[in-house]
Amino acid sequence: MKDLAELAGLDVSTVSRALRGDSKRVAAATITRVQQLADENGFVADPNGANLRSGRTRIIGVVVPRLTDVVMGMIVTAIDQASRNLGYLSTVVATDGERDTRSSAISTLLGRRVDGLILCDSLLGEEVPEKLADHRIPFVFAMRGCDGELSVRADDRLGGATVARHFLEAGHRDVAVIPGPPRARTAVDRETGFTEVVKNHRGARLR
């Protein structure tokens, strides 16, 4: 940092702010010049030093059941893009729906001092891990929601109902549903929406 400050002819504190892109306290031209000098001279900022000063890592932990699912892959990609746009790094852990793996993953992420968690692998009855119950670290549910907690998800119950109406409007009256995992809220809500519509339709039979 001192060497870079000498090259730029600036105070170390000004160089530090310029590298962070602090446009409120450093002129845009100065930020550009300092960052260009840093690139030309192979300067790489040490994030650990910044973390110690701010108490933040700018890392978001993302916990998912698996990455082979197409929809989950799209969600993780969108989270990563949004994180980068906001100056954060997202790190993803797949649990395969295993309770112990999930607990270990969350412990590891907390040990890395992540600034927040996005939980995409919650199971009914165990949505909020014990380690997060005190809410000392912010977290949000994605895809699989949780009653009483901040969640970003689709209306899966409406989705199941829409599928059932499609079958009935096509003239089908003898229908069946193959549900997903019984402890995944997405699967339960879709099945509930589907069966409610079929059971309330005269002449339709649910296998």
Image (tube, helix red, strand yellow):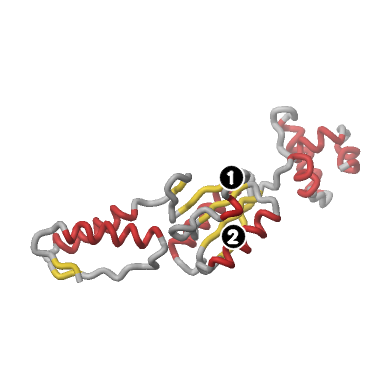
Point out residue 130 in the picture as x, y percentages from the top left corner.
Answer: 58, 54
Q: Disc count in the image?
A: 2
In which quadrant of the rendered image does the N terminus lie? top right
> Which residue: 26% across, 68% down?
177
Label 2 near label 1: C-beta < 8 Å?
no
Q: Is residue 182 left or right of residue 122?
A: left
Quarter of the figure with residue 171: bottom left
Q: Nearer the viewer, residue 172 or 132?
A: 132
Point out residue 101 in the picture as x, y percentages from the top left corner.
Answer: 59, 67
Q: Is residue 91 above or below residue 115?
A: below
Mark carried by residue 92? 2
Q: Is residue 16 left or right of residue 163?
A: right
Hey, what amino acid is under mark 1? His
> Which residue: 32% across, 68% down?
179
Tell me the CA gap for discs 1 and 2. 21 Å
Which residue is labeled 1 in the image? 135
Hey, what amino acid is under mark 2? Val
Q: Is residue 87 above or below residue 91?
A: above
Q: Residues within 10 Å of mark 1 (few under 14, many from 20)?
A: few
SS type, badge 1: loop
The disc, 1 or 2, on the residue closer to the chain's N-terminal end is 2
Point out residue 194 in the picture as x, y percentages from the top left corner.
Answer: 25, 60
Point out residue 185 in the picture as x, y percentages from the top left corner.
Answer: 39, 58
> Which residue: 44% across, 55% down?
143
